[in-house]
Image (spheres, rainbow, N blue to C red):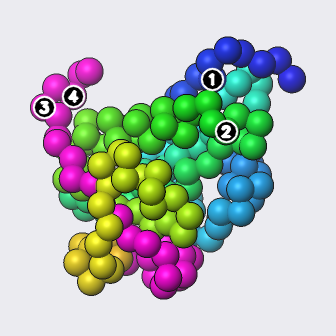
């Protein structure tokens, strides 16, 4: 495999689905509830290898940040942060009001990105209706939210 100094982050394409599924499975993340379309998902490529993924699942004015994973060989190199920052920027460009997520292991990490903990009962109905909330993540998962500032310069 050809390796580059800095992976390229780009919008996911339909042809990435098999590699995304494999990366999520390797990171013990569920495939259940993954949207049929990859609209809102971004991937990181290192040469010809897909080494990272993060997804934005729009839910009306809000969205769910989901399926954040990086290949074990690329951890602790800032790639997860770059993927999350890209999804946050994409959500702001789409005019999303707030991002929500569920985590069982990374609450402290997401706090560094401005996410705060909240209870499930205050999450908007459209977000709670996602498969991720209804059936995929355990009830013990921590719910977090980050308000966004919608950008008016949609060309950036």
The image quadrant where one finds the N terminus is: top right
Q: Is residue 122 magenta?
A: no
x and y, in percent, of residue 9 in the image: 54, 28
Measuring from the top left, give residue 141's x and y in whole percent. Answer: 49, 75
Q: Earlier in the sequence, mark 1 or mark 2?
A: 1
Residues drawn in magenta: 129-156
- Position above or below: 79 against 147: above
For mark 3, what is the residue? 152
The CA distance from mark 2 to mark 3 is 34 Å
Residue pointed to by mark 1: 7
| Badge 1: residue crowd in 10 Å (few <14, some 14–19, many ≥20) | some
* Mark 3 → mark 1, Cα distance in angstroms: 29 Å
Tag nearer the camera, 4 or 2: 2
Q: Secondary structure at mark 3?
A: loop
Mark 4 or mark 2, earlier in chain: 2
Asked if residue 62 lies left or right of residue 150, the reply is: right
Q: CA distance from mark 4 to mark 1?
A: 25 Å
Closer to us: 9 or 118: 118
Residue shown at the point (55%, 40%) measured from the top left: 80
Q: Do the residues under discs 3 and 4 have CB atoms within 8 angstroms?
A: yes
**Tag 1 and tag 2, C-beta contact below 8 Å:** no
Mark 4 Cα within 10 Å, few/some/many (few <14, many 20+)?
Answer: few
Label at residue 154: 4
Quarter of the figure with the C terminus: top left
Which residue lies under the disc numbered 2?
A: 75
Is 151 magenta? The answer is: yes
Q: Residue furthest right?
A: 1
């Amino acid at each position: 495999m050809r390796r580059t100094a800095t992976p390229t982050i780009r919008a996911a394409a339909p042809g990435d689905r098999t590699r995304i599924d494999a990366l999520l499975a390797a990171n013990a993340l569920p495939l259940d509830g993954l949207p049929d379309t990859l609209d809102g998902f971004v991937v990181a490529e290192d040469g010809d290898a897909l080494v990272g993924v993060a997804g934005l699942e729009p839910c009306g004015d809000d969205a769910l940040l989901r399926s954040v994973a990086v290949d074990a060989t690329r951890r602790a190199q800032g790639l997860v942060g770059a993927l999350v920052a890209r999804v946050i920027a994409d959500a702001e460009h789409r005019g999303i009001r707030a991002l929500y997520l569920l985590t069982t292991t990374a609450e402290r990490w997401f706090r560094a990105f401005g996410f705060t903990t909240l209870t499930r009962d205050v999450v908007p109905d459209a977000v709670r209706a996602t498969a991720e909330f209804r059936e995929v993540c355990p009830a013990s998962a921590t719910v977090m939210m980050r308000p966004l500032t919608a950008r008016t310069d949609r060309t950036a």
